[in-house]
Amino acid sequence: MGGIIEALRLTWRAGRLHTGVFAVCTVLGAVAPVAGAWLTKLLLDGVTTGGGAGAVLGPGVALAAAGLVMALVPHVLRYASAETGRRVGLLAQERLFAVTERFVGMARFEDPAFLNRMRMALQHGGTTPGVVVSGALSTAGAAVTGLGFLGSLLVLSPWMPVLVLASAVPVLGLELRLARRRAAVYWRLSPVERREIFFRDLLTDAQAAKEIRLFGIGAHLRERMSAQRRRADGENRRLDRRELGAQGLTGMIGAAVAGGAMIWAVLAAAGGRITVGDVSLLVAAVAGVQAAGLAVVNGIAQSHQQLLLFTHYREVLAAEPDLPVPAHPGKVAPLARGIEFRDVWFRYSPGHPWILRGVNLTIAYGRTVGVVGRNGAGKSTLVKLLCRMYDPERGAILWDGVDLRDLDPAELRSRISAVFQDYMEYDLTAAENIGLGDLAHLGDRDRIAAAARDAGAHEFVTALPDSYDTLLSRLFFQGDDQEDGDTGGETGVTLSGGQWQRLALARAHLRAERDLMILDEPSSGLDAEAEHRIHHSLRERRAGRTSVLVSHRLNTLRDADTLVVLADGAVAEQGTHEELIALDGVYAGLFRMQAEGYAEPPPPQAEDLLELVRGRFGL
Ligand SMILES: Nc1ncnc2c1ncn2[C@@H]1O[C@H](COP(=O)(O)OP(=O)(O)OP(=O)(O)O)[C@@H](O)[C@H]1O
């Protein structure tokens, strides 16, 4: 019931005028057929009883008017219904995405069950209200038509309406069962369809195209995509067959009732018990009641099915926050003392292994902390916890002594600038790619260019065809949003990996005056010269600022105030570069290994080369 009320409320909010037009047209469309049948009877009786022109003129004109209404109403109804659908769809989508923005952390976006529900909510949240409203209105309209015809039948024979109504009861039961089954199948198929979409996107993705071609996995992926489709088709086919059987049965019941009524009417007319007009009325009434009954049943069944699917939309809207936020969170003051990890334990879910097992770490105000560790040691996890994308399971992270959980997450993030390891590449212009780092400066070209200069991006951006206005995408046409979608135009350009990374850095630089700068592998894709230049500018910008740097290139972290080595979920070593080298532990080992790797190898001897060639060609 709550679902119906919410669906109706959503429709009303989306467009009162269209909902009103919808209702009025439904009533007109419902009354017109009954009026038409009665007017036809009056007309025929007027002709057969020889009442003259006066007896047929009135019903004739009224019949023409009813015909006009019946001709116009479906078109207006279709428009009102489509417009209501569009408005409700937009409103429902906006509400859904507003809810996802309220999720403070990332866990929801990594939860397959939630993603399934979200997909169902997106698919049905916008359509259900329209279907329910049109279902309710057309059910009400059909009920009016049906009652009108039932009354007409009652005038002709008392048992006829009972017979016709009785034949509708099993139909309703069957349709409701089918509706429930269909809703259950949709839910069951949601992950299957998400997988199919995944393979479909992969097969048309420019980034994936290289590997797909080189590894020759196109047919394999296509088969996996088709397998998902076949599975969904199989379930839908079974359902359609059930529906076919059920509807075939109900159709036969309806035809038998209509045929019986017709025979009775013809015999009654032959016996002189009813007039020719009565026969016409009876035929129209039986067909009308049956059509109305079917419309009522379909309306109820469809609304029932849609309301079952609508529960996903309601559940997403009612979803609890993923991370608790106090009703009156504390203000986030500018960082003055520092950030402290106090015995932080973290795993991604109770089913996942512990990633951090009691991390104790202080990031003092104005200092740079470099974080080092092997792949999977938990460095990026630490960074995400620092931005409160997740909460520690035990222990706490303190901002000047205040637990992050007691602070307003949006305010906390407004004090942080970051380049994540998996930074975004937005299919937008170069200026927007940088400007998104600080929306307040999205239109400030000077600041954007300054941030680009600091990140070593200005030169290549100004060399692009439209400089900062160049669209960095091969998915859309330049200026796509102003032109017709398929008229073509200039395609955008795409950047190299290192160039994208510089843009991500520029985005972070745009908000560089924030209290904390986090750089997770900011130079992994840069050439040696760019890396050198960028680290030089980072060093200058970082001076006196609090920053956390994560990198596997240990020489870029050498001058950090503190180096922290993460191993086995905890801080294994901590100190300056010199202290850790003197300690001769994990860091010293890693540093030596890299230094040796960078050292010039001895020139190969002729004998070595010969050996290599022999080995390669099996000589
Ligand atoms: N969203 C996630 N859900 C579940 N496990 C995750 C998630 N993200 C990371 N992990 C796991 O957490 C561990 C630590 O990952 P993390 O990305 O923090 O490591 P890292 O030290 O940054 O590694 P790298 O040097 O390779 O970047 C890994 O074992 C990884 O599989």
Image (spheres, rainbow, N blue to C red):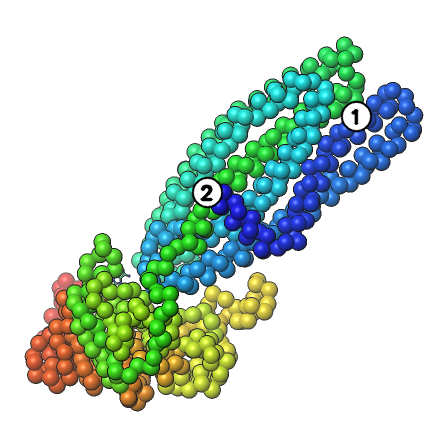
Judged from the image, the quadrant occupied by ligand 1 is bottom left
Residue sitting at x 39%, y 50%? 116
The quarter of the displayed image where residue 282 is located: top right
Viewer-proximal residue among 573 and 594 = 573
Give the percent coordinates (x, y) of residue 378. Answer: 21, 67
Give the percent coordinates (x, y) of residue 48. Answer: 86, 20
Residue 416, labelled with which disc? none
| The residue positioned farthest toward the top in the image shown | 271
Task: Please say whether residue 385 is visible from this viewpoint.
Answer: yes
Task: Please say whether residue 219 is visible from this viewpoint.
Answer: no
Give the percent coordinates (x, y) of residue 236. Answer: 44, 38
Q: Secondary structure at mark 2?
A: helix
Looking at the image, residue 482 sits to the left or right of residue 533; the answer is: right
Q: In this figure, which residue is indicated by the disc labeled 1?
A: 41
Residue sitting at x 43%, y 72%? 494
Q: Is residue 50 above or below residue 505?
A: above
Viewer-proximal residue among 529 and 132 = 132
Label 1 sits on what residue type?
A: Lys
Mark 1 Cα within 10 Å, few/some/many (few <14, many 20+)? many
Q: In this figure, which residue is indicated by the disc labeled 2?
A: 308
Which quarter of the rendered picture does the C terminus lie within? bottom left
Label 2 sits on what residue type?
A: Leu
Q: Earlier in the sequence, mark 1 or mark 2?
A: 1
